[in-house]
Image (cartoon, rainbow, N blue to C red):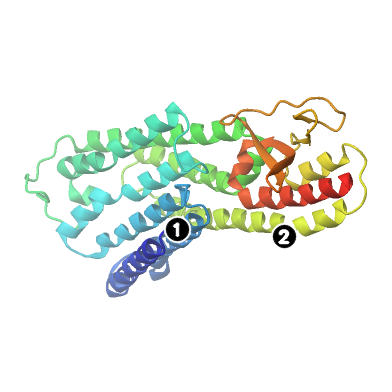
Amino acid sequence: MNPRLRLALALAGLAGGLVNLALVLRTGHDRPEPLAYLLVTIIGVSWSFVAAGLVAWSRRPENRTGALMVAVGLAFALNGLRLVGTPLGFALWFLVATLPAAVLAHLIAVFPDGHPTTRLQRVFIVVNYATTVPLALVQLLLVEPARLGCDSCPGGLLGIGEHRPFGEAALVVSGLIEVALAVLLLWILVARWRRASRPRRRSLAPVALVGIMLLVLFTIRQALLVVVSRPAPFDVGFDLAILALLMLWPLAFLAGLARTRLDRSAVGDLAIELGEALPPGRLEQVLARALHDPTLELAYWLPDRQAFVDAAGRLVELPAGGGDRAVTILRHDGDPVAALVHDAALGDEPELVQAVAATARLTIENQRL
């Protein structure tokens, strides 16, 4: 990641938060929400996603997850527009009010790959963005501003007059579309978890749990809003729960990064364990435990046969790239020594794989000596 770009995004997130902070302090006493709630919703969520996203982006620049997290944080900074206190400010905010949720939904749909891997994901992303601003515009055109939360706005907010006979229908249709998208995203998330291998589930677990809880709460809230007039009596409780989960999402992501670092630090213990003579097949079990991949296979290179074999001497066919299995070749002076055949999901933790592979290579060379 370009350091200048990272600095520019960090400054943009910081500036957006400071502007919003000034707006919160200026209007906080005039609003029904507590000051702390405004600070967290408009600034805390934004800064947490931007900070975690920059960490992720610098760690794996080829993966778009970090960039999407930064985009989520910057989109949440737009919520400060609702504190401007003018009808125009409210209209601008309402047009972009669903954008943070849309970008967050995009992030959840493609995590941890950073890009869509199935047709269903691609369809969801297109529909998700295609309905974001258009739905908000339809509501501004057809629904009375007071029903949207702006009691001080004039009836002709966008200059089209005060009569909006189809406003209730617009609210119901918008709510149903939001519920349908949330259910579809929940299906994508659960389906990904069900088909994920053990290493992939391990990397998904913290974020997936928060994401599922967030989607369930959002779906229930939006479904209730379809049948209950706004403002609804349950809004505060749902908003606080959703806010807490939004703050937990980047923390869960960072917890996953911290766990990866702990795994890498445990490679030292692995080297000590491999310092002792191991019976045939035992080395493979130790490496599988270190990488948290019970399907791992260790294949030894035999120069005289120009082939890889397992501990029992049977030929091992290395899988081609692009599937569910990946290969890490252990080399010494450019020549192959052995190969680790492991789950492709370990590509999310290249530093751990490289550290374990280096330790395994030294062990195999010592055994041969």
Question: Would residue 120 appear left or right of 267 to someone viewing this image?
Answer: left
- Would residue 152 be seen by someone viewing this image from the given angle? no
Relative to residue 242, is residue 150 drawn left or right? left
Q: Is residue 192 above or below residue 253?
A: above
To which residue does mark 2 refer?
265
Quarter of the figure with the N terminus? bottom left
> Can you say whether 191 is above or below 141 in the image?
above
Residue 214 shows in this picture = yes
Residue 28 lies, in percent from the top left, at: 32, 71
Q: Residue furthest front?
A: 304
Residue beneath the point at 41% across and 56% down: 70
Q: Which mark is residue 49?
A: 1
Q: Can you tell which of label 1 and label 2 is closer to the viewer?
A: 2
- Quadrant of the rendered structure where residue 15 is? bottom left
Secondary element type, mark 2? helix
- Report the front residue among 190 and 125: 125
Number of on-image labels:
2
